[in-house]
Amino acid sequence: MPTRPTLKKTGGEVEQGLEFADHAAAQALFGELNRNLHTVEQTAGVHINCRGNNLQIQGRTDAVELAVSALRQLYELVRKGYPVFGQDIAFGLKILESSPTASLEEIFLEKVCITSKKRIISPKTINQKNYIEAIRHNDIVFGIGPAGTGKTYLAVAMAVAALAAEQVQRIILTRPAVEAGEKLGFLPGDLAQKVDPYLRPLTDALNEMLGAEKAADLIGRGVVEIAPLAFMRGRTLNKGFVILDEAQNTTREQMKMFLTRIGFDSQAVITGDITQVDLPGGQPSGLAEAKNILQDIDGISFCHFDSSDVVRHPLVQKIILAYEKNSHRTATVQKPDVH
């Protein structure tokens, strides 16, 4: 454990020292050219002076406490063999800022699966960890939230892990091809080529988990199926891990049809963002309706994500927040006065 000297107050700010005994772990934590420490400075709003394995962290009391807590916990993760990357630093700070008593070890060491390139896939936020736990303990799980929060990616990772553990015999990935509709006939190529653009995000996630060659082999043997939602009608999906992505674009009838396809020894994960419904003619979203109808049924779990769970480029989180603020302002302006 790193030592932690008493806080020193200097002109409205505090300064705290950290000393790390394990030189190799400390250098891995700091990153090349102290890049990870710069991330801590920018994210937590502190100044860090580094000398060997010793750090002096200066800033507001709450900011220093946040930085110290994150660095201490991440250092222990490094000592246990977890490869800490720059994005882990930012994620760890976000977690501890919202939940100061959170354990980064419990979250980051929650291994879901290992990709073809030997990268460990694990949750990066508390909501992601809860989502994974919900998938492990429920037959049907809904993941609802904005883009970039890992809903689909983690669902595919859990499906791959379940297939590898022989908990299921096949994986079925599906999406509603809402944008296509009757326009499919005007796109070039056969049916598979026509619907490919709508299923590409699922294919990309699968290729990253398994590698393109193995993914293609499993698809060719029917172990993995990627198909538009319309192809699910009339089927019973036994012994499978089924993922319905972009579920906000399902109609009421489509959602009911999908949920009633689930067979024995099967598991379903439904993901979507109810703020981005693309259904024509103002049709109500099947996902939004399912949320209201099914939330009290045992065996069905609803997991919600927000902008703090975004694990894409940092600008994505800022974009989502900007749109949320604008929607709130618009709703406030348009709200009629009650006399």
Image: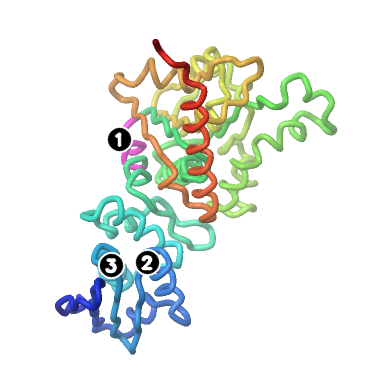
Spatial separation of the CA atoms under disc 2 and disc 1: 39 Å
Counting residues from the start of the chain, the first of labels 2 and 3 encountered is 2
Image quarter (top left, top right, bottom left or bottom right) of the N terminus: bottom left
Circle 2/circle 1 CB separation < 8 Å: no
Q: Secondary structure at mark 1?
A: helix
Select label 1 or label 3 by which is in front: 3
Q: Amino acid at mark 2?
A: Gly
Counting residues from the start of the chain, the first of labels 2 and 1 encountered is 2
Q: Residue furthest front?
A: 339
Please give the residue where the numbered disc 2 appears in the rendered image.
Answer: 45
Q: Quadrant of residue 87?
A: bottom left
Please give the residue where the numbered disc 1 appears in the rendered image.
Answer: 137
Pointer 3: residues within 10 angstroms few (<14), some, or many (20+)?
some
Is 294 situated left or right of 170 in this image?
left
Spatial separation of the CA atoms under disc 2 and disc 3: 8 Å
Image quarter (top left, top right, bottom left or bottom right) of the C terminus: top left
